[in-house]
Image (cartoon, rainbow, N blue to C red):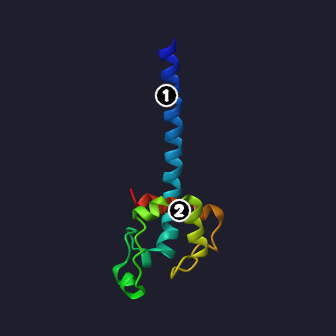
């Protein structure tokens, strides 16, 4: 009986993890168009930074796949997106909350 409960519990946890990862994958897919429109010119198509923009702006923080970016909480990352930081202008003010979340999902996917 205990083995059956363990297996059922494990299956439930796996199912929840799968559903969560599919939700993140959907956000990432939806956020790509927004990223391409608003972010890729500075941060590069791969999120590692556009070298020409880094040189022009003197910015080292254009790499969105860095450990520093990964360490940001979702709330802090969304604040950067919506309010900007340093030389980065606010990019997400005109976006809905869902579009901001989708954009963040895409940015997070670039580091994987």
Q: Give the residue at the far left of this rendering.
A: 51
Q: Are marks 2 and 1 in contact (CB under 8 Å)?
A: no
Residue 49 location (% of width, % of height): 38, 74
Vertical comparison of 64 with 3: above or below: below
- How many numbered marks are there? 2
State the image coordinates of residue 33 (x, y, percent, origin top left).
50, 68
- Location of residue 44 with respect to 76 vertically, above or below: below
Quarter-wise, where is residue 98 in the image?
Answer: bottom right
Extreme-bottom residue of the structure? 56
Q: Which residue is mark 2?
A: 104
Q: Earlier in the sequence, mark 2 or mark 1?
A: 1
Q: What residue is shown with label 1?
A: 10
**Quadrant hosting residue 55:** bottom left
Q: Is residue 55 left or right of residue 71?
A: left
Of 27 and 13, the residue lying toward us: 13
Mark 2 neighbour density, 10 Å: few (under 14) some (14–19) many (20 or more): many
Quadrant position of the C terminus in the picture: bottom left
Residue at image point 45% right, 60% down: 70
Question: Label 1: how many residues lie within 10 Å, few (<14), some (14-19) or many (20+)?
Answer: few
Where residue 79 appears, as percent x and y from the top left, is: 60, 68
Q: Secondary structure at mark 1?
A: helix
Q: Residue 21's mark? A: none
Q: Is 13 drawn above or below residue 31 in the view shown? A: above
In space, the residues marked 2 and 1 are separated at their CA atoms by 29 Å
Q: Is residue 46 left or right of residue 18?
A: left
Q: Residue at x 37, y 68 (%)?
A: 46
Q: Give the residue at x 49% y 28%.
A: 10
Q: Indicate the position of residue 106 as horizontal and vertical percent values.
A: 48, 61
Q: Secondary structure at mark 2?
A: helix
């Amino acid at each position: 009986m205990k083995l059956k409960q363990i297996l059922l519990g494990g299956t439930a946890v796996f199912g929840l993890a799968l559903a969560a990862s599919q939700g993140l994958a959907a956000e990432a897919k939806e956020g790509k168009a927004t990223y391409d429109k608003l972010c890729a010119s500075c941060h590069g198509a791969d999120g590692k930074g556009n070298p020409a923009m880094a040189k022009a702006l003197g910015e080292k923080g254009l790499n969105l796949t860095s450990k520093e970016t990964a360490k940001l909480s979702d709330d802090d990352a969304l604040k950067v997106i919506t309010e900007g930081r340093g030389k980065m202008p606010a990019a997400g003010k005109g976006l809905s909350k869902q579009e901001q979340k989708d954009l963040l999902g895409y940015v997070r996917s670039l580091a994987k």
